[in-house]
Image (spheres, coloured by chain):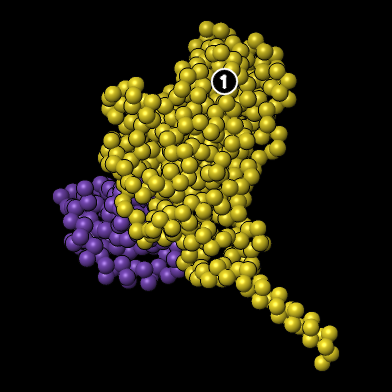
Chain colours: A yellow, B purple
Amino acid sequence: MQPLFLVALAGLALCALDAARAQPARDATPAWTAAELDILRTLTLSSLPRPARDPSNKYAEDPRAADFGHRLFFDTRLSANSSVACATCHQPARAFTDARPLAVGIGVTPRNAPTIVGAAHNVWFFWDGRKDSLWSQALASIESPLEHDMPRARVLDVIRANRDLGADYVAIFGALPAQGDREGVNRAFANIGKAIAAYERRIMPGPAKFDRYVEALLEDRRPAPQDDLTLDERQGLRVFISDQLGRCLRCHNGPLFTNQHFHNIGVAEPQRQERAHADVAQSILAQGRIAGAEIVLADEFNCTGKYSDARPGECAELDFIRRDSPELLGAFKVPTLRNLTRTAPYMRSGDRRTLEDVMWHYRTLPQARVGKSELNDLPITATEFDQLEAFLRTLEGQIDAPALYLRPPISAQAK
Amino acid sequence: MLLGLAALVLVDKAAHGEDARRNGARGDHSAPIDLHSAAGRFRIRLAGLAREERLNHLHGFALSLATADGQPVGGASIVLRGKQRTALNPLPTLPRVRPGPRPGAYRVEGLRFHVSGAWLLEIAIEFEQSRDHVAFDIDVK
């Protein structure tokens, strides 16, 4: 054998040894079982179906409505002081949140602003689920004194007074109602919400490192180096999906990592609320889903209401709604875990500044002041909590939406 | 309230194993689930519900009710309830059972599972002076 060839072989062998040394931790993790792979498949974005049709909004898939909704979403004229838009609290660069503990519009609201990414898949809206569609949620924010503080009649005045908005409205929905036509104003106000919803439905999560890693596993190939989970991330994922360890899937399941339901995990009302109202625990706000269910059933803009486009029998979520059930007291909606690194601070009261703080919540298990917390002591170590946090960071991905929808429309930029 | 569930579960276990084998492939909606009520008064057939069901999806399925000797039972009052085996939370929805087009035919609508794992479903039946129920397991993936 030629000496040069032997040198080359020795070099190859050394390279192989180096490669093995470079990834000892990865190779030390046990392979995923078939049952675990089945679970992982359910969590990837490739398992996310197209959003279900919203029977209450016949404009939901209308591209003209989405474009109009995009303009409205960024338009501060739809607020009492012309300084607040939907995008004030739902900023594209922050995965459509605002980095504040509590959302700030005209005033300080009592709730952390949730992301709208993937909201087309939501069943209920607001933390207590007091709305049953994206469009009716938007209307509530516009009229809330702490958010836009804009009564519906004034919203229509703004649309009428501004040719750009008025022309778009008429092209999509037909003539604007006369001032004082209360029924017409209600219907037109609902249309404003439906246009905003048409825009929001197009804001979806894009693949994250986690998705690419699992796709590689399912295709029985090695993930690209940048998509391969570290040992800590893999261990965190194992804890996450284990019903003996993290039990996270009980609430955070499916490709959006939420079961779209309501659970009491002992989160307190915001300290600001606690200071301002000694009896905050007795307030409607703190009752969670048990109050939210009653509110949505009575809502004039719900799926069965006269401003909905749904036909009889198409509002299944309202038809089969659970109410008056003890576990719903103090229960709030499970948020998505995608893009967590851009959506701090956390929890409905925004008082968990970091993911580490969130982990601490699950380690310390605070008692609920309203209702009963469902959390139990988890048999996982401090290191495993750190690994869980490492895994959660792999859920960060781009926003999947037309690029122009991720920035203010030209008209808003020019203002 | 789920009445006498512990006893029901014991009664149903044997039938469950048999049903599971009869149902074949997991998540198979084409094979019906056949059940006998705890006191043996009714035979129940569920078509369109699988022993392993999907998460976060509103389910609807057909329920056929007959007496022990196979006569269809129309006009019964039927309630479906369920709870998680582990956390004991109830179903996130309130399913309803409506009469179908033929005697003994009913339609169950509005069943959703929001947590994976084992669920215990109970069907309570009231017909004339006769009451009975059956409990069975569903594995939610």
From the viewer's perspective, is residue B67 above or below residue A365? below
Residue that label 1 marks: A84
Mark 1: which secondary structure? loop
Q: Which of B93 and B116 is in front in this view?
A: B116
Q: Nearer the viewer, residue A138 or A314?
A: A138
Return the x and y of residue B97 as percentages of the image width and height.
Answer: 33, 46
Q: Which of A123 and B67 is in front in this view?
A: A123
In the rendered structure, which amino acid carries the disc numbered 1?
Answer: Val
| Residue drawn at x 25%, y 65% as measured from the top left | B12
The answer to whether any part of residue A31 appears in the image is no
Chain bearing mark 1 = A
Quarter assignment of residue B38: bottom left
Q: In this view, does A305 lie to the left or right of A403?
A: left
| Residue drawn at x 59%, y 17% as measured from the top left | A83
Return the x and y of residue A270 as percentages of the image width and height.
Answer: 38, 30
For disc 1, the neighbor class at 10 Å (few under 14, some 14 to 19, many from 20) is many
Quarter assignment of residue A332: top left
| Residue drawn at x 22%, y 66% as measured from the top left | B10
Seen from this angle, which residue lies furthest bottom?
A1
